[in-house]
Amino acid sequence: MTTTPEQTTPESMSMMDHLRELRMRIIRSSLAVAIGFFVFLALYDPIKNFLTQPYRNLCANRPDFKCDGSLYSLGPLDGFGARMKLCAYGGIVLALPVILWQIWRFVVPALSKKEKRYAIPFITSTMVLFSVGCWLAYWTLDKALEFLISWSGTDVTSTFQVTKYVMLVILMMLAFGVGFLSPVLVVFIQLAGLVQPKTLIKQWRYAIMIIFVTAAVITPSGDPISMMALAIPLSILYLLAVLVGWLLVRNRETFA
């Protein structure tokens, strides 16, 4: 009887077995991304309307901006490029649970029983925090656009190219989503023993400063509203992550 990679232990698996399992995980993740791509492709118009709703609301509420909420294609490839980019990034996001699951299944044989029990909470918290970050980026999009358009000056008609607008929204949501994963990293480095919780507590001022600087750098729009909308929640999440890490480390030492 043949043994599948999932039935073998790290000690019994050869290098070729590890490579075959890695290939299987990559193929499954790629298929999930492809399925997500075609889902977004089929629902492109509703998704595009959803992403442009903040811009249309802003134009309706601010007639002095002289915009009607429409997007323009300035070249024959603009519309196609916008559709492909949105579907590609959307496919990755939609396949994120599958990708995380495949990563976990690949590394789980090398984990101890104590480490395995943290896997599901880490994966769940990663998905939740990423989704919250994307939602926050979308919620603040109209305010960021209002700031950017207002700085264009008076008597300036705002006309957005479809490719650039779609990419701005995608990058904003990715920046917020990835940024919101930092608390998971903070908890992980405490559990791994790389940094002691008391060290993170002592250096909290430097951590907050780094968060604000990082938020200013990774925010695609560069406006202060988006930066503050990202930096303030991340600062709160950092303190909560230090507290969670401290509790987990203390409990692990208590029951060790």
Image (cartoon, grey):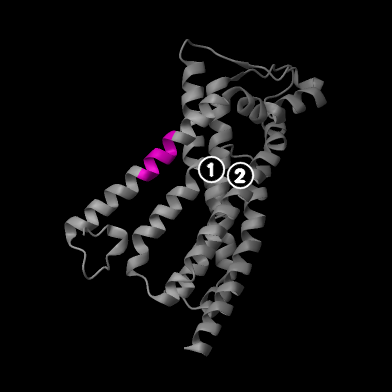
Q: Residue 156 is drawn in which quadrant?
A: top right
Amino acid type shown at disc 2: Cys
Residue 23: image location, x then y, percent: 27, 48
Which residue does the image show at 70% across and 28% down from the upper left?
53
Mark 1 neighbour density, 10 Å: few (under 14) some (14–19) many (20 or more): many
Mark 2 neighbour density, 10 Å: few (under 14) some (14–19) many (20 or more): many
Q: Main secondary structure of the magenta part?
A: helix
Name of the residue lying farthest toward the front: 1
From this view, report whether residue 3 is shown above or below residue 132: below
Which residue does the image show at 56% across and 48% down from the upper left?
177
Q: Is residue 52 visible?
A: yes
> Start and end of the magenta stretch?
28-34
Quadrant location of the N terminus?
A: bottom left
Q: For numbered disc 2, what is the local secondary structure?
A: helix
Residue ID for mark 1 = 174
In terms of sequence position, does the residue under pointer 2 or pointer 1 come before the other? 2
Number of numbered discs overlaid on the protein picture? 2
The stretch drawn in magenta includes residue 33: yes
Q: For numbered disc 1, what is the local secondary structure?
A: helix
Which residue does the image show at 43% across and 73% down from the upper left?
115
Residue ID for mark 2 = 134
Compared across the picture, whether 97 is left or right of 145 comes to: left
Compared across the picture, whether 4 is left or right of 90 comes to: left
Amino acid type shown at disc 1: Leu
User: Is 25 or 245 nearer to us in this picture?
Assistant: 25
Q: Is residue 210 visible?
A: no
Residue 70: image location, x then y, percent: 67, 17
Residue 223: image location, x then y, percent: 63, 39
User: Is 166 or 111 nearer to us in this picture?
Assistant: 111
